[in-house]
Image (cartoon, grey):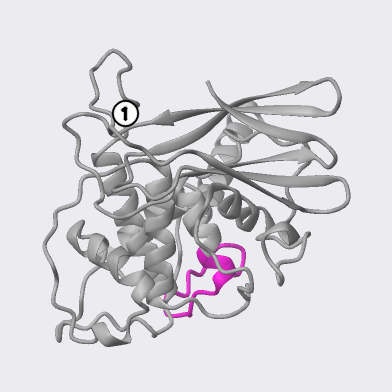
Amino acid sequence: MNYKRILALTLVIIMIFATNVYAFNDLPESPEATKIKELQKRGIIEGYVNGELFKGENKLTNAEGVQLIVKGTELSLAAFLFIKAPLASDSFNNVPEDAWYTDSFIIAAVNGVELPRDIDPDAEMTREEFAHHLLSAMLIKGDYPFTKKLYVIEDDADINPDYKHSIQLLLNAQITQLDKDNNFLPKQAITRMEAGVMLYDAIAFMKAHPYQMPDPNLPVDEPVAEDPVTMSSTNVNEDIQKVTLSWGEQPNAGYQLMITRIEFQADQKAVIFYKLQYPEEGKMYAQVITTPEAVTYIPTGYTVTIQQD
């Protein structure tokens, strides 16, 4: 077999495998299918049977939903300082330490995505849960401009009160929609297709409104009276304590609290330095009461104090 024939055969094999990797075989031609295929190309969404089937009608599990949201919004642990690696058991009762979805749950929890401690990874995720967790992750990544139209939702009484604001913001951003009867169907399990389309639209919205760190040289009207930063700690185990800094309730998502460094001193003392970030002048923020928090881990036995950097 000559060189040219080997090269041609190699190219054919590459093309065959590339086609299999980048195409679900069970998706009809539609705008929704195009979005799903794009998420697959980006490595955000995966399929069944060696990746050949998407099975969009299947109900999304909590494990799949959390992984989708973490991947799609690009949450990570890069901005956190750890004395020890975080465990799933630090935040959840039912998430094992070695499952395929464990890392996504840990990343979500450390970043502050509002997941219940007793969440069942194998249970179906509802439409309202996916919407709320998705918005929670979006607001962690940045502050985005939302219009303030109040949508009339016919089944509003069925929505968890804690999730109503999230759904309204997603409706305003055209990330989700109501059905023809103006129902959201909050308690209905969300399908893989519905979740994928919603995630795609959320990513598009985030890219259309990129978050920019405020210019430190710009004047910002800081509040005359502000809530002091407080500290609380809980023992994770006999060796590690979890330390949480909180800035109290703030009027919008433009207020952020960040740990900048930790200084370990003699006599088992540790000083956590933090920085406060105020809303950027002239920028719109989600008008929702937030409690900025930052978390780190310190060895048990250290006396911890906090100081603004």
Instruction: Classify residue 95 as left or right of residue 207.
Output: right
Identified at 26% across, 79% down, the residue is 184
Residue 109 falls in image quadrant:
bottom right
Quick check: can you spot residue 140? yes
Residue that numbered label 1 is attached to: 212
Give percent across and percent down for residue 101: 65, 60
132 within the magenta span: no
Q: Which residue lies furthest to the left in this view?
A: 149
Quick check: can you spot residue 27? no
62 within the magenta span: yes
For mark 1, give the secondary structure. Answer: loop
Quick one: 235 or 91, which is closer to the camera? 235
Give percent across and percent down for residue 111: 54, 47
Q: Give the range drawn in magenta.
A: 49-65
Give percent across and percent down for residue 286: 26, 50
Q: In which quarter of the image is the N terminus?
A: top right
